[in-house]
Image (cartoon, rainbow, N blue to C red):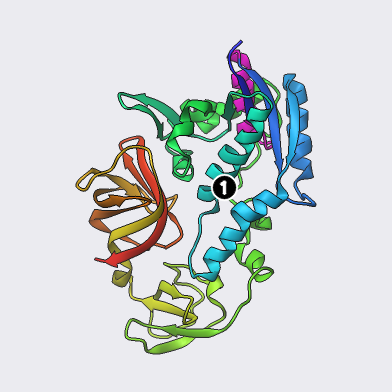
Amino acid sequence: MKQKTAVLMSGGVDSSVAALLLRDRGYNVFGLTILQYEHDPSDSQVEKAQSVAHLLGLEHHTLALSQFFREAVIEPFLEAYRAGRTPNPCFRCNPRLKFGKCFEIARQMGAECIATGHYARILSTDRGLRLGRAMDPWKDQSYFLAGVPGGMLENILFPNGELTKERVRQIAREHSLPGADTEESQEICFTPGGDVHAFLEGQLEENEGDIVDGSGAVLGCHRGIVHYTVGQRKGLGLAGGPYYVRALDAARNQVLVGRYEELLARRVYAVEANFFAPLVQGTGGQAKIRSRHTAAPCTVIHATGETFAVEFTQPQWGVAPGQALVLYHGDIILAGGVIDRWDPA
């Protein structure tokens, strides 16, 4: 019997197959499902996870972590929007909740490892374990995991990392697991229906303000900076365009707009950095500025403490402070951090 392992089970096909694979590989598996809200609207998910655990013959536990989730994920998400940023909540949730608090509880239950249905890999290199891309490039989720401390990798398992999504669905069908053909959701888990703005409207104060160009000239009026993000073109209501949102100035309550070329960035700076390997000036790699961005060639120009910065070989468009900057070397992640600012090309 291999290590006792906790699998975070959502009731979905990915985590269900992850639990099945580990069970069949001889791990001593039990399931954990997170209750993220005091009156959790996802009770059906808990029931699904419990049902899958029963089907697989696994012990199952529910973790009531609504207060922790609020403090560790939702409040920073709201604060980022108040500051005129566009946050990536998964980048914060993974190290703090899933591989932080949940693993802490799992250890208390005797677990040596924690596993999820994420599509990513933990690769062995001559410098130790590294977080890497999944085999399926269309499902790779390593970008969202770049904040997980490197020291934890020896205790993390990603069974789906070597598989394609279709193969995972096929395994689920073969074992009569639920959700094998359920359409995937790309929504933020705490924004019902995927409507981020509707969620923010109930949480944040909204004040109208000016839309201005690079010279400071007022071009129009906005309905609250929380409704805008860098790169946005639609919904500005400006004549003489096209204009794109270039930045959000929370202190002045202004939406700054510009022409397409004004959103091209050469250098990008990150804070809250998580390093998987030592970085020095001149290190080459490829960096992503958002989850669906194709990693672009770049060079490290700064790396110290909890910050790093890269210079792209070719300017990249639409860098949004609050999103994650993730630096790769091939399939391996070197570092991840939260975008703080960028320099125009």
Rendered residue at 77%/24% (across/down): 54
As rendered, which of 340 and 298 lies closer to the eye?
340
Residue 287 seen from this side:
yes
Q: Nearer the viewer, residue 246 or 7?
A: 7
Residue 225 at what x, y percent from top left? 52, 75
Query: For the view shown, which residue lies furthest in the top direction?
Result: 1
Q: Position of residue 110 (x, y in %)?
A: 66, 23
Picture mark count: 1
Residues drawn in magenta: 7-26
Horizontally, is 285 left or right of 323 in the view? left
Quadrant occupied by the C terminus: bottom left
How far across and how far down the image is residue 255, in percent?
45, 78
Left or right position of 277 against 83: left
Which amino acid does the dot numbered 1 rest on?
Cys
- Can the viewer see residue 180 in this picture? no
- Report the quarter where the N terminus lies: top right
| Residue nearer the viewer, 102 or 34 | 102
Residue 47, image x, y percentages? 79, 36
